[in-house]
Amino acid sequence: MLALRVYVATTAQQEVGPLLAAHAGVSHVIRVGPSPDGGVTLMTADVDSRVVDTLLPDLLAHGVPGDDIEIVHRETSHPMAPGRPRDTPAWSGGGFAWSELTMTSRQYTHLVPQYLVTMVCAGVIAVFGILTSNSILVVGAMAISPDLLPMCAACVGLAARRGRLFWRALAVLVLGLTATCLTAFVVTSLLRRAGYGPASTSLAGSVLGVLPEVNVATVTVAAVAGVAGVLAFETRSSSAVGVAISVTTIPAAAYIGAAVALDDRSGARGALGVLAANVVMVIVCGTLTVLAQRVTGRGRRG
């Protein structure tokens, strides 16, 4: 099962051993030893995920800087030990802490080169899949796309009522999808000028010509992807479920760029509508999933 371990670097004036030992849900408090210069002492403790939201404020109030606190997830098992009522299956991910979820989301609100490069790569692969009606290439583009991460961060921002987190995550998502769209436009334009056959025909007649149509399947898939994406984000298995999210975004974003390059304004408008509907549905359903967990107690403090 999944467990949490907290590492705290503390000075003599910030002695946290008694605080950790006395806190409910904290066990195996160990003083590892002083640093080589003797400035700080490392403390470790196993922490129930349900008390992280109350433990962290206590540590900060005790004078421990946030940079000196680290939360680590680890897989644990107890050979020959009887099961306990509080044990949860490993695939459930255990409980989650709001403070931890927010901290995890924050790192996906920064526009870094690796993110943009990956979205550009997804755009190149997706546009070839669209032009050649090759669904395998489209799936490949969805598999490498990292747009799940900022989208889920936006859901957490909405659920936690953190406007700054939400808007920054949304901006990263929009810029990434814009990069995919522009990449598809540039690639299609270059291929068209070079006389590449598939880049000279109408997208409407291709196997993937149904992409710019908003229908019940579009909305349903986006809604389910939002739920699955957030659950994967919480349990740190986002890479395995990224395709579920990207199936609603990357193909539509690449289709917009390809359609504009081929002067298919109707297709571009339709694909833009599909992309917008998908993003809205994913974020709404993802946010509702997080809120539902909070109400039922999985994300509750203490």
Image (spheres, rainbow, N blue to C red):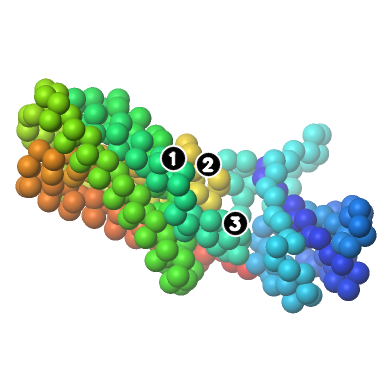
Q: Specify the label residue 61 is tagged with.
A: none
Q: Earlier in the sequence, mark 2 or mark 3?
A: 3
Q: Amino acid at mark 3?
A: Phe
Classify 10 Å Cα crowding around label 3: few (below 14), some (14-19), many (20 and above): many
Can see residue 279? yes
Label 3, on which residue?
Answer: 96
Q: Specify the label residue 241 is tagged with.
A: 1
Between 292 and 205, the residue placed more toward the observer is 205
Measuring from the top left, give residue 211's x and y in whole percent. Answer: 17, 40
Q: Amino acid at mark 1?
A: Val
Classify 10 Å Cα crowding around label 2: few (below 14), some (14-19), many (20 and above): some
Label 2, on which residue?
Answer: 237
- Please tell me whether mark 2 or mark 3 is closer to you in this view: 2
- Tag 1's secondary structure? helix
- Tag 3's secondary structure? loop
User: If the image is split into quadrants, where does the C terminus sit?
Assistant: bottom right
Between 222 and 263, the residue placed more toward the observer is 263
Q: Earlier in the sequence, mark 1 or mark 3?
A: 3
Image side of residue 233 versus residue 97, left or right: left
Image side of residue 291 versus residue 70, left or right: left
Residue drawn at x 70%, y 50% as measured from the top left: 72
